[in-house]
């Protein structure tokens, strides 16, 4: 049980004294960057999905 208590104490010290937390401005910049990247990736996936849908539709209509 002493090991668990020591671990919690050391974790608290590390989080409060050794970790450098981002500023509010840095956090906002990172959030915007993540949102833009997610949007771009979503558009790429949408384009791939539409292309595959078009190709498969053309393929199946050519069979009839």
Image (cartoon, rainbow, N blue to C red):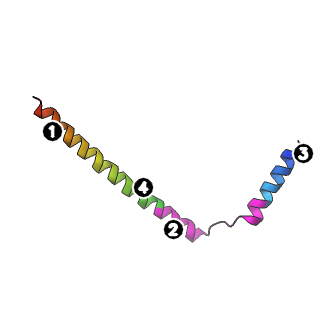
Placement of the C terminus among the 4 image quadrants: top left
Element assignment for label 4: helix
Compute the Cα span from label 4 to label 2.
14 Å
Picture coordinates of residue 32, whole percent (x, y): 47, 64
Residue lying at 12% horizontally and 30% vertically, measured from the top left: 63
Of circles 1 and 2, which is in front? 1
> Dot 3 corresponds to which residue?
2
Picture coordinates of residue 2, whole percent (x, y): 90, 45
Placement of the N terminus among the 4 image quadrants: top right
Q: What stretch is highlighted in magenta?
A: 14-33
Picture coordinates of residue 29, whole percent (x, y): 51, 68
Which disc number belongs to residue 38?
Answer: 4
Compute the Cα span from label 3 to label 1.
69 Å
Residue lying at 77% horizontally and 65% vertically, measured from the top left: 17
Picture coordinates of residue 49, whole percent (x, y): 29, 44
Which disc number belongs to residue 29?
Answer: 2
């Amino acid at each position: 049980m002493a090991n668990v208590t020591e671990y919690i104490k050391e974790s608290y010290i590390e989080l409060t004294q050794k970790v450098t937390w981002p500023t509010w401005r840095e956090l906002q910049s990172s959030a915007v960057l993540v949102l833009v990247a997610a949007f771009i990736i979503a558009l790429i996936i949408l384009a791939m999905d539409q292309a595959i849908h078009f190709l498969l539709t053309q393929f199946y209509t050519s069979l009839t």
